[in-house]
Image: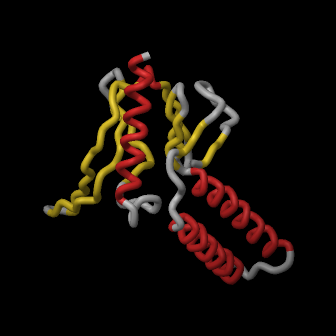
Amino acid sequence: MIECVPHNSRVADNWVRPYEPGSGRWLVIAWEAFALAMLSWATVRQFDLIGHGVRVVAGLLAAVWTVGAWRILRLGVYVSPEGVLIRGLLRSRVMSWREIAGVRLHRATHRLGPWRIESGNTVLLERLNGGTVYTELWEKGLDFHSQPGVFLAVYHEIRNRHRSAAQE
């Protein structure tokens, strides 16, 4: 388990990610570094940049890559006795267990014209007001693709924590 302490926690101070991140995240980070290096090269060539211009472009894209890599490494679902924290690529969301009516699996499908493409299970949080919140947990995602048993174990962990909180 990986522990994390967010700065703007409104529910708990001790968040735990109930799974190890998949090694595929490093592949994504490396791919993004390559893509941003190619963008940097193309920008320098396109605009005939020299000297400070090259350094500014390289510095800006390196900063974007650093922030993106940091967010990719922190992606996921974290739990605490008081609630759940969902870290996405662009934003994070905190929900207390009291706000959650249930935790369930959802079979995700995508439509491409007349075809339906099955994309595996995801974990959904059902809110008391009837809405649903998608988590970053996906059965065929980078963290669980080669280990579906871990995906189900994480789902059961979150569901059991919710049930325990509801009984208190």
**Along the horizontal axis of the image, is 36 left or right of 100?**
right
Residue 55, position as x, y percentages in the image: 81, 72
Q: Residue at x 30, y 38 (%)?
A: 104
Q: Is residue 37 left or right of residue 113?
A: right
Q: How many marks?
A: 0
Q: Residue at x 63, y 72 (%)?
A: 33
In the displayed structure, does residue 121 sit left or right of residue 116? right
For the point 54% across and 45% down, the residue is: 17
Q: Residue furthest left?
A: 114
Q: Residue 94: horizontal and vertical position, in percent?
A: 53, 32
Seen in the picture, residue 19 relative to 86 is either above or below; the reply is: below
Q: Is residue 94 above or below residue 72?
A: above
> Which image quarter: residue 114?
bottom left
> Please, which colouring scheme is shown?
secondary structure
**Residue 49 in the image, given as x and y percentages of width and height:** 77, 79
Q: Residue at x 56, y 73 (%)?
A: 31
Q: Which sits in the foreground, 101 or 66?
A: 101
Whole-percent x, y for residue 127 in the image: 36, 27
Q: Residue furthest top?
A: 168
Q: Is residue 47 above or below residue 168?
A: below
Image quadrant where residue 52 sits: bottom right
* Image quarter of the C terminus: top left
Which residue is most to the right?
Answer: 51
Residue 54 left/right relative to 147: right
Pick the front one: 53 or 84: 84
